[in-house]
Image (cartoon, rainbow, N blue to C red):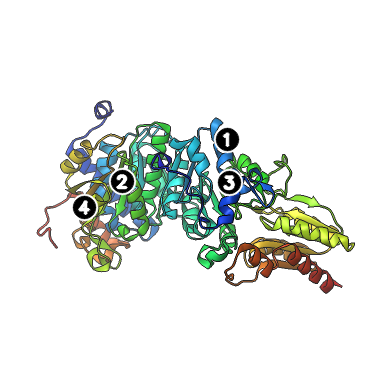
């Protein structure tokens, strides 16, 4: 359908005009990371692979087939790809209608326009009637950089998390995204899948075989502190743990990929065994991972705790790397915040 | 498909009129149980409900999830009180299930819930969603190669919602002939006449401009409704089909007709009995149709 019309040549992504991005795409690697290890380059491909054996899978976008690389799906399954144009609510509600007829739709657009703009359609048409719609919110957080607040999404986890019967999950890298997509096909009910900018550095060397929704992954052990991170911040937190280890500080790093249902036992275990917790997310510190973990701690295990993320403000504009440094959402920043928490604990 | 179907149904105008009367009487009865209900929005589409469910839709009450059934989305979900008795009457569930209408834990609330009520193809209530749902169902029919049609009943005030036009645009773009929308054009939304609150006319021209085939009929004229439904084109590649049904909000109880006071209400005592008797007499000719 959509793909059949005027496919034309690859117009690149919305990053067109950025010479670096265009060149890197051609070279199939970004800063030394092969394209096949970047979420942006595997999304459409993985869905297309799954669709080879599962006729229920359909994919839709809202005029962002190139940006999300769902174009890769469209090229292989043109009859199961629908471009809804710039009409996100319509796309998500229509996906619910498709799901009611037995299809499993994956609908992709910027997180700012799926998890925020279309939140009511997700609640009313997907979660409440338990439709198997998978809403992909890509370019979440502040990863849109200089595009500014209209295109940043630091509220989506907070909004999605309050919706009953909705699974909310964040992909840290390409391999984990593949695992999420594979596990999602037969998972009951609706799901919000949050992706970063798509160029996220690898965290997992291979597709994690033990991936399960609601079951956090402990990626590093340590006795002095646990960093619970999600999405893009898992990589930064691992790097921070390396730096702290050099100073003899042992940090457990937990990838809390599923924000809902939260793995509360992993939080309790971290409190019990490491005595301090820092949450790190590319999201407002209100409403997202930090709030979810705080709820568990306040009710069950009070310990030194700190939420780290975007401190309830609209982000500055700037290139993503500069923003991550500014908001201390890179390895240096997370290391610094972890030290502050440990110093405060004494 | 129609020949086989028609053999099994009583399609006389008298029978359909009787079923429209049944819808109105049940709306009175159920509203009294709940203590409040949408009388006038349901009365306006009683003939449309009767024609669709008793004379037209391809359904199997014994198999509510039959993949090849026609779909019906009540986008103006607040008229569900008129739909529930029909589904019971057709055998989707026992009529006695309606006796605890809206009580704590009931499956039957003011708006229909697909997960609780057999025969409800999609939950509704938040206006502006239904046409998108129907669009998705029609697209699914194309993806899966099934020939069912998807019907969506819209309120006229609901056309204020922007998402309606997103769906209308997409349906025209993808040429979903199997998508049939029906506007219950009863002229009133809650705050007053639609053309004063937020005008929706010319509905015909607006949908035509979005690539739809549009029919405009008297939504209380059963022969006209049946003729229009019977002439609909099958699912396939072509213009989506719109029926704008001019109706009268509150039709059937004279003091409710075109009145703003009965969007939500509750009749008790003698008023209830009088309204019941008036509906029993059947639709009476109106003195002025241009009120």
Question: Gap between marks 4 and 1, in whole Å?
Answer: 44 Å
Question: Gap between marks 4 and 2, in whole Å?
Answer: 14 Å
**Disc 3 residue crowd, few under 14, some 14–19, many 20+, Cα 10 Å:** few
Given the image, what chain letter belongs to the residue carrying mark 3? Answer: A
Residue B94 in picture, x, y percent from top left: 40, 40
Mark closer to the chain start, 4 or 2: 2
Tell whether label 2 touches label 3 (CB within 8 Å): no
Q: Are marks 3 and 1 on the same chain?
A: yes
Q: Quadrant of residue A307?
A: bottom right
Query: Is B112 situated left or right of B205 in this image?
Result: right
Question: Gap between marks 3 and 1, in whole Å?
Answer: 22 Å
In this view, the residue in front, B5 or B178, is B178
Q: Residue furthest right?
A: A248
Given the image, what chain letter belongs to the residue carrying mark 2? Answer: B
Q: Of the numbered discs in the image, which one, if any, rests on residue A49? A: 1
Q: Of the numbered discs in the image, which one, if any, rests on residue B172? A: 2
Which residue occupies 31% across, 49% down? Answer: B153
């Amino acid at each position: 359908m959509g793909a059949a019309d005027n496919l034309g040549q690859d117009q690149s992504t919305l990053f067109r005009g950025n010479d670096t991005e265009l060149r890197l795409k051609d070279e199939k690697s970004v800063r030394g990371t092969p394209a096949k290890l970047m979420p942006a380059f595997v999304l459409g491909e993985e869905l297309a692979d799954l669709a080879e054996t599962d006729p229920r899978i359909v994919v839709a976008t809202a005029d962002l087939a190139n940006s999300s690389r769902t174009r890769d799906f469209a090229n292989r399954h043109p009859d199961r790809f629908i471009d809804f144009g710039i009409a996100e609510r319509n796309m998500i509600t229509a996906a619910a209608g498709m799901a009611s007829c037995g299809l499993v739709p994956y609908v992709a657009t910027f997180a700012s326009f799926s998890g925020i703009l279309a939140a009511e359609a997700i609640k009313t048409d997907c979660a409440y009637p338990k439709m198997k719609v998978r809403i992909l919110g890509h370019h979440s957080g502040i990863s849109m950089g200089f595009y500014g607040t209209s295109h940043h999404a630091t509220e989506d986890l907070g909004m999605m998390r309050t919706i009953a019967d909705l699974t909310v999950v964040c992909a840290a890298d390409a391999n984990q995204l593949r695992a999420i997509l594979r596990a999602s096909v037969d998972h009951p009910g609706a799901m919000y899948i949050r992706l970063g900018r798509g160029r996220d550095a690898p965290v997992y060397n291979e597709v994690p075989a033990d991936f399960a929704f609601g079951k956090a992954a402990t990626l590093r052990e340590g006795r002095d502190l646990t960093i619970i991170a999600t999405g893009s911040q898992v990589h930064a937190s691992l790097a921070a743990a390396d730096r702290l280890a050099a100073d003899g500080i042992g940090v457990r790093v937990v990838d809390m990929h599923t924000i809902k249902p939260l793995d509360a036992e992993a939080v309790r275990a971290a409190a019990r065994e490491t005595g301090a917790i820092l949450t790190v997310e590319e999201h407002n510190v209100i409403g997202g991972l930090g709030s979810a973990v705080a709820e568990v701690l306040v009710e069950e295990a009070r310990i030194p705790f700190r939420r780290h993320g975007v401190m309830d403000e609209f982000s500055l504009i700037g290139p993503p790397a500069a923003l991550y440094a500014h908001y201390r959402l890179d390895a240096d920043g997370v290391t610094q915040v972890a030290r502050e928490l440990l110093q405060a604990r004494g | 498909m129609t020949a086989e179907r028609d053999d099994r149904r009583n399609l006389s105008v008298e029978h359909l009129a009787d079923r429209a009367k049944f819808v109105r009487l049940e709306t009175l009865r159920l509203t009294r149980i709940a203590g409040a209900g949408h009388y006038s929005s349901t009365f306006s589409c009683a003939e449309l409900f009767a024609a669709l469910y008793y004379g037209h839709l391809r359904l199997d009450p014994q198999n509510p999830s039959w993949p090849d059934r026609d779909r019906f989305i009540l986008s103006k979900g607040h008229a569900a009180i008129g739909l529930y008795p029909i589904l019971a009457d057709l055998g989707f569930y026992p009529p006695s299930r309606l006796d605890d209408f809206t009580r704590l834990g009931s499956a039957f609330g003011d708006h229909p819930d697909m997960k609780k009520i057999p025969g409800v193809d999609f939950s509704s209530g938040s206006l502006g969603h239904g046409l998108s749902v129907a669009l998705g169902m029609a697209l699914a029919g194309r993806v899966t190669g099934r020939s069912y049609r998807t019907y969506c009943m819209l309120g006229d005030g609901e056309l204020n919602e922007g998402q309606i036009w997103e769906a209308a645009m997409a349906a025209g773009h993808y040429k979903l002939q199997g998508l049939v929308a029906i506007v219950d054009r009863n002229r009133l939304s809650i705050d007053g006449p639609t053309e004063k609150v937020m005008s929706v006319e010319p509905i015909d021209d607006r949908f035509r401009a979005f690539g739809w085939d549009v029919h405009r009929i008297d939504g209380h004229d059963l022969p006209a409704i049946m003729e229009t439904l019977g002439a609909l084109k099958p699912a396939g590649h072509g213009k989506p089909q719109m029926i704008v049904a001019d109706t009268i909000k509150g039709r059937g109880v004279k003091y409710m007709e075109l009145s703003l006071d009965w969007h939500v209400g509750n009749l008790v005592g003698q008023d209830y009995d009088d309204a019941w008797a008036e509906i029993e007499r059947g639709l009476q000719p109106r003195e002025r149709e241009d009120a």
